[in-house]
Image (cartoon, rainbow, N blue to C red):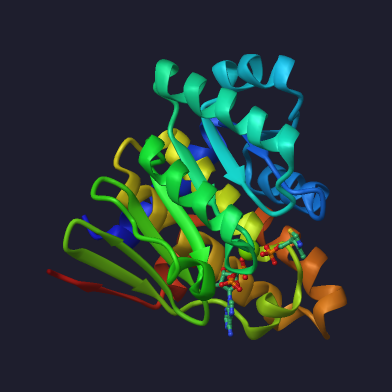
Amino acid sequence: MSAIQHAAGLLDGVRRRRPRVHCLMNGVVPKFVADGLSALGAIPSMTSSPEEVGHFVAKADALLVNLGTLDAQCREAIGIAVDVAAKQGRPWTLDPSHCDYSPPRAAFAQDLLTRGPAVLRANAAEFDLLSVPAGVVAVRTGRQDRIAYNGSAFSVVNGHPLTALVTGTGCLSGAVIAAFLAIEPDPYLAACAAMLAFGVAAEMAGTAAAGPGSFEPALLDALANLEGAHILSFAKADHEQG
Ligand SMILES: Nc1ncnc2c1ncn2[C@@H]1O[C@H](COP(=O)(O)OP(=O)(O)O)[C@@H](O)[C@H]1O
Ligand SMILES: Cc1ncsc1CCOP(=O)(O)O
Ligand SMILES: [Mg+2]
């Protein structure tokens, strides 16, 4: 089965299984990210208090760690969350948001990469600063999204330029990866499926939107209305074998 066919099936799996995704999200876009996960068919939770986060992660099917508005309490919560994820075998995605602005944040992100994330999702500037250890699926987003693991790579060229004009779309793409990780044990296939689903939904939203203001709700609608058949019909993606 191709990665595209597999993605279509996994989308149905997300709708059937409604995975719980716990997000340690930045303070800028938590509502958009939670709405996007709900639209896709997952169940978001966003608590970040150090005394509670471990309980939430233990009950979640996957975790997203986003560094966008990192502070001392976030660092503490992230440490607890990734320990619980490791102990309970919960897959997690790292979004090293804005680590290119801040050497301490880049160092923190680099350290987190040694603590067992299944997937790194970053924009080009963030991605190019980090070195991705073996065993972590590397997703570099932009006009083209490239998913790389162990010598293989998959590129998705779906999407719409308005995505780049709406704050939080990268954060939401990381959350969508976490939702697919929750139901697909192979993190490379999960990340390929997530970027296909997100890219095709963004393309559908782009045709319905007049600008960034209407693109944002259109993207939520497209995630909710996305079907496996849309992925099969509209996917623009290629494998590179290493
Ligand atoms: N020029 C573009 N054309 C189409 N899609 C884009 C473009 N730039 C970014 N995207 C999409 O926007 C989303 C966020 O990617 P990116 O802008 O790289 O991350 P971030 O928002 O974290 O900076 C991804 O789904 C990516 O595919
Ligand atoms: C603007 C901003 N500042 C800190 S986090 C954040 C949101 C970033 O969202 P995205 O990278 O998904 O556009
Ligand atoms: Mg980002």
**Residue 130 location, quadrant:** bottom left
Q: Quadrant of the C terminus?
A: bottom left
Image coords of residue 235 (percent x, y): 42, 72
Residue sitting at x 65%, y 38%: 23
Above/below status of 212 relative to 100 = below
Image coords of residue 152 (percent x, y): 19, 64
**Ligand 3, image quadrant it occupies:** bottom right
- The reply to whether residue 232 is in sight is yes
Image coords of residue 206 (percent x, y): 69, 80
**Residue 153 location, quadrant:** bottom left
Left or right, 163 with reference to 27: left
Q: Quadrant of the N terminus?
A: bottom left
Q: Which residue is nearer to you in this view: 115 or 36? A: 115
Residue sitting at x 46%, y 34%: 182
Left or right, 221 with reference to 214: left
Question: Which residue is most to the front?
Answer: 104
Residue sitting at x 73%, y 15%: 51
- The reply to whether residue 226 is in sight is no
Residue sitting at x 58%, y 17%: 59
Above/below status of 74 relative to 83 = below
Question: Which residue is most to the left?
Answer: 242
Above/below status of 217 relative to 53 = below
Q: How many marks?
A: 0
Question: Which residue is most to the right?
Answer: 213
Q: Which residue is nearer to you in this view: 167 or 13? A: 167
Left or right, 115 with reference to 212: left
Image coords of residue 168 (percent x, y): 72, 62
